[in-house]
Amino acid sequence: MRVGLISDTHSPALGVHPPEEVRRAFVGVDLILHAGDIYSSECLDWLEEIAPVVAVEVPPAPVIGDPRVVEKRVVEIEGYAIGLVHDLGMHGIDEVRPGAFARSWPADLSIADSLAAFFDGRRLDGVVFGHSHWEMSETHEGVLFVNPGSPTLPHQTRRLGTVAIMDVTPQGLTGEIVDLKRFS
């Protein structure tokens, strides 16, 4: 199964829906996970033209109340548990960015255990998050961490950015960052 990952669209502030390059990047995905900073249900409607959407958002956002949106969730995909949250607050790491776990994670703490505690005791195979606008795909302690970045504000700069694709196979999960400039 192919899963499109997107976060930090900031719609409608940066357009009513994501850039058209997102549609091209997500050709063939079976599901889309949106990791927050959505701002409008119209963004989710546009994404649902591509594939079903599951989303999270930090209250009190205008999309809270949309049945597709909750604050934090675990999605089961082909036997794998995938955590979905906007801001992944983990032990002293203000913003999870590429290399943050290797640089800053306390050696005496289990990343997998801390992540399970964050998701109400659920053991996860992967987690999708946003907030920092920094794209990353890293595996730590057997857990795939993917931040798709932002299609509209990568690294907090207004330009065409990134999304990600998660492939879910019997062999496991993989995450690929997709530079939307490839589709422009």
Image (cartoon, grey):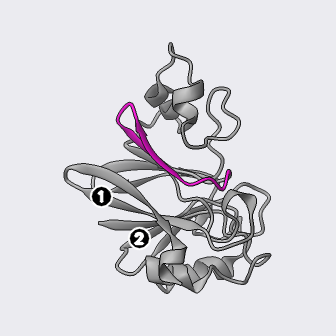
Where is residue 70 shown, x and y percent of the image? 62, 58
Residue 142 lies, with reference to residue 65, above or below; the image says above
Q: Which mark is residue 60?
A: none
**Disc 1 residue type?**
Val
Q: Which residue is mark 1?
A: 168
Is residue 102 at least partly visible in the picture? yes
Residue 32 is left or right of residue 94, and the answer is left
Q: Are discs 1 and 2 less than 8 Å apart at CB?
A: no
Q: Is residue 72 magenta?
A: no
The residue at the point 51 percent across, 29 percent down is 102
The residue at the point 34 percent across, 79 percent down is 28
Tally of numbered discs: 2
Q: Is residue 137 magenta?
A: yes
Q: Which mark is residue 31?
A: 2
Q: Quadrant of the C terminus?
A: bottom right
Q: Quadrant of the N terminus?
A: bottom left
Answer with mark 1 or mark 2, whichever residue precedes in sequence. Answer: 2
Residue 169's quadrant in the figure? bottom left
The residue at the point 67 percent across, 50 percent down is 132
Range covered by the magenta-colored residues: 132-144
Where is residue 173 shown, x and y percent of the image? 32, 51
Give the residue furthest to the left.
170
**Disc 2 residue type?**
Leu
Is residue 5 at least partly visible in the picture? no
Where is residue 170 shown, x and y percent of the image? 19, 53
Where is residue 180 shown, x and y percent of the image? 53, 74
The residue at the point 32 percent across, 49 percent down is 80
Residue 166 lies, with reference to residue 42, above or below; the image says above
Label 1 CA crowd tier, 10 Å (few <14, some 14–19, many 20+): some
> Closer to the camera, 135 or 35?
135
